[in-house]
Image (tube, coloured by chain):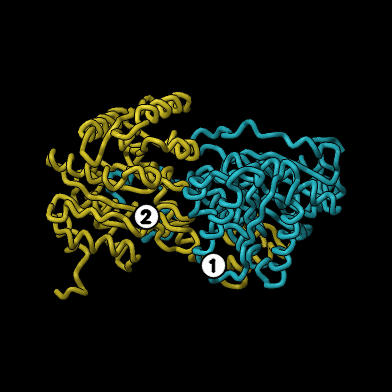
Chain colours: A yellow, B cyan
């Protein structure tokens, strides 16, 4: 069998057998929207749902890469395999990567139990790439015990990551009070676990205290889980075991309460909807007889139509 | 004719005649998703497209309300009428208003040439309310010369406001360097005009200089407009005339280059799509025979289906 006609089933079998190159090729097919994407996703489906999916987010400078590295080490010390997606948010307009200087996580290069992949985010409005959930699916099906998605908490990405993960870790660092303030709309509601990193620096207890105060004010009525606040010095590995224990405790809680299934069903519903809408958008761009989106938009701008009537035309439900 | 059966055409005529209560009632019909919403939008359509639509955004504390007030005064001094929408971003989860303490803009209460309305944002992921573009349409059709949408630059809202306005003004204040840094992904690409407010404070020239440096690095190849950076002390009215002149210069440029039509068509297309997708979502929630979104999501989580196959089912294009 030549490389070009390498079957999807073969790739999936090799990825599940622990071959990193097969995992990489499957993720590339996702990123490149390969024609075989549907076959890939159908082939992966029966093998998904086993991984513990963790989202790690935080503002630039809080030590996300270092923390990811420390978490990988802690999971590996427990004999668990880890697949990591490091998602770079991009500018919504230029499409270029904002954080080109991502620290390479070379420590684990020789460990077959660790797979790390950087992904550029080209999603709608600069958010997480549409391909992120599908790449997570690849890692899950490939059999990694933990799938960790790391993303910079800029804009809405911390809210989006909460939609993708079973457990969301919000990372902070001392002396970033302004950052907390600015981002509080997002972070206070998405974290299942808060970690104040760089705890050897002045102000760490104060940051934890301020955070605790803000979390106490947040509306969590529907959710019985109280997010713990932990202190780490990821660079030295201090406090990382406690983070892993808290992650496992949260996952156990998710299982017991049925919240795991609810979260995953919400995530799947959002993913299905996004795929359906993308497919419709492609169709809407090329409808016949000036019923395409651009023609309808021109009619709305000229005052000849309104957005509701135009939407009816787009959906083929207009009375005309 | 009783109040309850008040006809939409009558309301529109009265709004266009300058009656604020009729404007308020039309916007309420938009906000409440009144059954007559489609009739309202169809009735407004022929009267839209005349207003100069300005978006004003900035981080908390830069002086947005004061600047809005100062701009209203400057436009009124030129004999132009102004309709304002002050949009509060809300938490995506709690639905509560984040900024309950909005300063009431009472200065213009007796001026029939000014209409001000606060709107809560309950949009997708905490962004601008889906109803914002429709409320803008009401003010435009009612005949206000200027429609000004003010929103707090949190998360992606500064990117979203750029999608709604003809001209986007990004407001900053001295000593908010961290804020610039954190938000730069958004603000450097959306502003048609930058205003450093509180220019009487130490550090204003430095903020302007830093901003100029960052803008110089931004990719603006496809856009010949160079965003000016202006200094104001909105509280004292200093520099506000220059802002109005720059706004008018930008609008003239938009006209001349055809960019105005392109922007408005992009805006209309996004609005049509959003309405079409919302209508489909409502339909997808209630499909028969376990073909509804929740059932499909459960099948994906169990591994019995994958998101692509589920999307096909949702769209009725599956082969099954």
Q: Secondary structure at mark 2?
A: strand
Closest to the observer: B133 or A121? A121
Task: State the CA–CA distance, disc 1 to disc 2.
Answer: 21 Å
Residue A176 lies, in percent from the top left, at 42, 38
Q: Which residue is mark 2?
A: A88
Q: Single out the mark in the foreground, 1 or 2.
A: 1
Q: What is the chain identity of the residue bearing mark 1?
A: B
Closest to the observer: A207 or A68? A207
Q: Which residue is mark 1?
A: B220
Q: Is residue B297 visible in this depiction of the protein?
A: no
Crowding at mark 2 (Cα within 10 Å: few <14, some 14-19, many 20+): many
Image quadrant occupied by the C terminus of chain A: bottom right
Outermost residue toward the front?
Answer: B202
Q: Give the residue displayed 17% in from the left and 51% down from the top.
A: A107
- Position of A85 relative to A264 (above/below): below
Q: Give the residue displayed 56% in from the left and 34% down from the top.
A: B98
- Position of A97 relative to B94 (above/below): below
Dividing the picture into quadrants, the one containing residue A123 is: bottom left
- Position of B82 relative to A37 (above/below): above
Q: Is residue A163 visible in this depiction of the protein?
A: yes
Q: Which mark is residue A126?
A: none
Image quadrant occupied by the N terminus of chain A: bottom left
Q: Give the residue displayed 16% in from the left and 52% down from the top.
A: A108
The answer to whether residue A284 is left or right of residue A130 is right
Residue A99 lies, in percent from the top left, at 38, 56
């Amino acid at each position: 069998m030549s490389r070009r006609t390498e079957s999807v089933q073969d790739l999936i079998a090799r990825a599940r057998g622990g071959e990193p190159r097969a995992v990489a090729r499957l993720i590339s097919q996702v990123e490149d929207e390969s024609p075989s994407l549907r076959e890939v996703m159908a082939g992966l489906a029966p093998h998904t749902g086993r991984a513990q999916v963790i989202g790690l987010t935080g503002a630039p400078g809080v030590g996300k890469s270092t923390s990811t590295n420390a978490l990988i080490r802690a999971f590996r010390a427990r004999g668990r395999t880890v697949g990591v997606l490091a998602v770079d948010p991009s500018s919504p307009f230029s499409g270029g990567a904002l954080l080109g200087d991502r620290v390479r996580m070379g420590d684990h290069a020789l460990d077959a139990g660790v797979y790390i992949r950087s992904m550029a985010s080209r999603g709608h409005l600069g958010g997480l790439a549409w391909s992120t959930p599908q790449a997570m699916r690849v890692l899950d099906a490939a059999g990694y015990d933990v799938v960790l998605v790391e993303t910079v908490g800029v804009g809405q990405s911390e809210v989006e990551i909460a939609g993708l993960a079973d457990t969301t870790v919000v990372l902070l660092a001392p002396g970033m009070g302004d950052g907390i303030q600015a981002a509080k709309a997002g972070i206070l509601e998405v974290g299942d676990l808060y970690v104040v990193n760089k705890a050897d620096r002045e102000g760490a207890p104060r940051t934890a205290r301020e955070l605790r105060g803000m979390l106490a004010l947040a509306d969590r009525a529907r959710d019985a889980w109280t997010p713990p606040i932990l202190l780490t010095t990821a660079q030295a590995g201090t406090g990382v075991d406690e983070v892993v224990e808290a992650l496992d405790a949260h996952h156990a809680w998710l299982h017991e309460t049925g919240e795991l299934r609810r979260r995953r069903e919400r995530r799947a519903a959002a993913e299905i909807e996004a795929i359906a809408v993308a497919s419709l958008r492609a169709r809407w761009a090329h409808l016949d007889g000036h019923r395409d989106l651009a023609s309808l938009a021109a009619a709305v701008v000229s005052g000849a139509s309104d957005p509701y009537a135009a939407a009816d035309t787009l959906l083929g439900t207009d009375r005309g």
